[in-house]
Amino acid sequence: MNALKQLFKGHDSPANTAKQRLRVVLIHDRTEIPAGMLELIKDDVISVISRRVPIDRANVTVHVDNAGNENRLLVDIPLLAGDNRRGASRTSIPRQRSS
Amino acid sequence: MQSVVVTVTSGKGGVGKTTCSANIGCALALLQKKVVVIDGDIGLRNLDIVMGLENRIVYDSVDYIEGRCRLRQALIRDKRAPDLYVMPTAQTRDKTAVSAEQMVAMCDELRKDYEYIIIDSPAGIEQGFHTCLAPADRVLIVTNPEVSSVRDADRVIGLVEAQEKGPAQILINRLMAARVKKQEMLSMDDIVDVLSTELIGAVPEDEAILMSTNRGTPVALNGRGPAATAFHEIALRLTGEEVPLRVQQPVSIFHRLFGKA
Ligand SMILES: Nc1ncnc2c1ncn2[C@@H]1O[C@H](COP(=O)(O)OP(=O)(O)OP(=O)(O)O)[C@@H](O)[C@H]1O
Ligand SMILES: [Mg+2]
């Protein structure tokens, strides 16, 4: 939701608000995946993935994307930089191939 | 005879199906087409009063379907256009009075004599809608430029496509150019974009509609205002002519008083 808001900042005329809200509601209507269901899916994804790797739970996003006749579930899971990992927090160090 | 059944429907009620059916019927008839407009809203008939023919009803479509009259007797001739007929429906029955098969059979009879059969469908996605959809060659889905009716239109488009009735086209009604310009109202492009469905035309909000409905004279019969013009353009598009899409601007008081065109 925040990402959506950000994306359309500066275009927040009443007509545009209406259009963006319609876009989102129609995706859910067409896929028969209610918006609240995405929150449940998100919780499931977090619990499954975090068993294996440390993830940034607060910033996981799940949404349905619609392109033409195709709908896909897009899940974005930011990884947490662990002690021995080169992560986003140390961007000054260039990425290197491991091993 | 080459004949087309055009079903005019919507998801949300009150968006202007009856107004559009009546006016498109009149506009087609003024193009010298043989036209019949069927009231498909059994139990809530309104096409007759919108067209000013309410005092001429003797029989209705349910009488014909149940064998109490012949097809011709259930049709009201509208003398204001060369070949325009209206088929009223029963006011005291419900949607179960006519089945989809019966509607298809009735339209097949009418196809022998009429080039355009316009069906004013009830709103919604219940039986009445399916009955009116069954004989359709083309489907016009009326929506207002407002979120709930656009959302419901999308649902109906889905059902029309699932039944392989179509092509479905959107008819935007009650568009206000000034509010679109101020970005207060969804535009034609916005609606086409979110519904990804072709547009047959956009009819502006026009106070002449209220006046004409009070009198029972559809604007398309003799009005020259923005809504009347939009209905004539939609009728032309239905006949296959290419008319560029545009938003009809409201006419100024000056034009209303002194203008001729
Ligand atoms: N372009 C317009 N400008 C102004 N008023 C309009 C316009 N189109 C329709 N109206 C008004 O909107 C109201 C509803 O129209 P109408 O009865 O045609 O809708 P409907 O979709 O057939 O409704 P229902 O779902 O109940 O059958 C009427 O009062 C009509 O006069
Ligand atoms: Mg109606």
Image (spheres, rainbow, N blue to C red):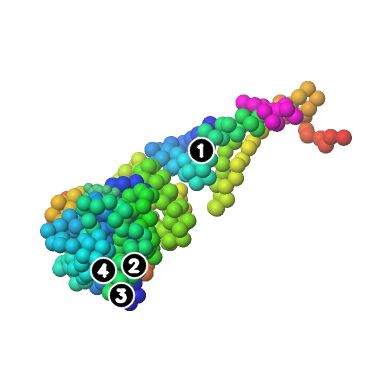
For residue B215, side relative to residue A59 (left or right)? left
Q: Which residue is mark 2?
A: B105
Q: Which residue is mark 3?
A: B112
| Residue occupying image coordinates x 22% and y 62% | B63
Q: Which residue is mark 1?
A: A34
Q: Closer to the N terminus: mark 4 or mark 2?
A: 4
Q: Chain of mark 4?
A: B
Determine the CA span between mark 4 and mark 2.
18 Å
- Circle 2 SS class: helix
Q: Which residue is mark 4?
A: B35
Q: Are marks 2 and 1 on the same chain?
A: no
Tell which tag, 2 or 3, sits nearer the viewer.
2
- Circle 3 SS class: loop
Determine the CA span between mark 2 and mark 3.
12 Å
| Residue occupying image coordinates x 25% and y 60% | B62
Q: Is residue B26 above or below residue B183?
A: below
Q: Closer to the N terminus: mark 4 or mark 3?
A: 4
Dot 1 amino acid type: Pro
**Range of magenta residues:** A47-59
Question: What percent of the width, then of the height, locates residue B255?
Answer: 18, 55
